[in-house]
Image: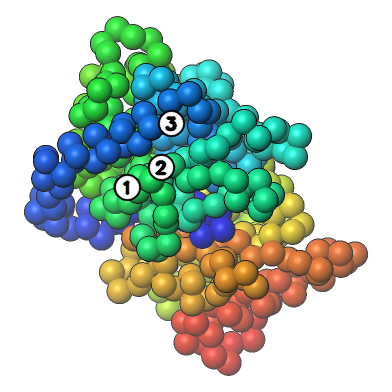
Amino acid sequence: MEDRTGNPEPRSMRTSSSNPIAVSEERLEPRRVRRQKVRDFEETIRGCVGERLLIAIKGPPDPDSIASAWAQHMIAAELGVESTILYFDPVSHQENRALVKSLEIELIRYSEKVNLSGYRYYALVDTQKPGMPIDDKVLAEMRLLTFVDHHKNTGEVEADFVDIREDAGSASAIFAEYLERGSAGLEPGNQLHSKLATALMHGIKTDTDNFFAARRIDFHAASYLSQHADMDLLRVISTQSMSPKVMDILHRALENKEVRDNYIISGVGFVRSEDRDGIANAADYLIKREGIDTAIVFGIVDDHLIDGSFRTRSQALDPDKFIKELVGADLNGNWMGGGRLDKGGFRIPVGVLANCADRELLWRITEKTLKGMLYKKIGYLNEESG
Ligand SMILES: [Mn+2]
């Protein structure tokens, strides 16, 4: 999944597909350390028995974040802690809707009407930064209990339990490890557990680009989960067809693409939030073109955010650094984008310009500005674009 305000996407070609040796040399953390992590995770959750825990998915829910949140929900239940999974952005992409529907995962969409007063603790999964997009005063009353992620460590997380593994291709793999090594493991023949294993497997699969970018922990987790997962269900969930809207976005991305050296850049115009994954899909598609190693696709989502997806196969490029240097931070000092080894994304508010009545003009300004920034960043200082 993608970054949503500082919360990017999956992982590298660089250690896995293009350099298989690096993977075999990569080690899992020592067994002792892993066991201790699981114990601490469970201990922390047990510490709030009798309280209700909020498990939040930041940014548009994707298979990795949905499965991770669900795993934490089930582990918490096993340990006697009731929890609710909360999300903020619409579930886009039909695959994700199919996942939630066919596994009957209960998620609650945040609105101001959702009463959070019963929650003193919250947990975050598969996201780079602490905090939630809710009222500051309400948030201040809550304590970040656990934080489990696989994005680049920003060093800003303060929680009772923190587990950030930059060497994991998915957050789902970390939760699979908790299940495998903890006291709330998956039981053979338990239907709910089989569904959870299926969801986690799907989370790993999508975040690692069908295992091409998987790391040791992802393969290990998949081998454990495969004993419990429902492979037929997995097939159903992961082979949903592409929606016409997403295909339109792909079409526009191909039409508008510009190639500069090893970069391919494309603006796709206005996109509805439920179709925003089309931007990421388009970047996934464009990166396949021979002779380039980096793809950037952007559009205006719901008239108020410039949403961009970044893909690279370059060994020399650090997506997190590239994107942060490109788009910078907002007035509150929050980065407007970020990345992992081979992927990333950004979201820039359109702000007051969203009121512009001439949408075509607004898009032309956006495209020209973004392309100008990009070309400047990659060294095409005098390029006239748009
Ligand atoms: Mn993830």
Between residue 384 and residue 349, name the one nearer to us: 349
| Residue 263 picture location, percent across and down | 45, 72
Which one is in front in this view, the residue at disc 2 or the one at disc 3? 3
Which one is in front in this view, the residue at disc 3 or the one at disc 1? 3
Q: Mark 1 sits on what residue?
A: 163
Q: Secondary structure at mark 2?
A: strand
Q: Is mark 3 within 8 Å of ligand 1?
A: no
Q: Mark 2 sits on what residue?
A: 146
What residue is drawn where x is 36% and y is 22%?
79
What residue is drawn where x is 60% and y is 46%?
141
Give how far apart the Cα atoms at labels 2 and 3 are. 11 Å
| Residue 33 picture location, percent across and down | 16, 44
**What type is the residue that disc 2 sits on?**
Thr
Q: Secondary structure at mark 1?
A: strand
Residue 203 position by quadrant: top left
Which one is in front in this view, the residue at disc 1 or the one at disc 2? 2
42 lies left or right of 337: left
Query: Where residue 48 is drawn, which disc sits there?
Result: 3
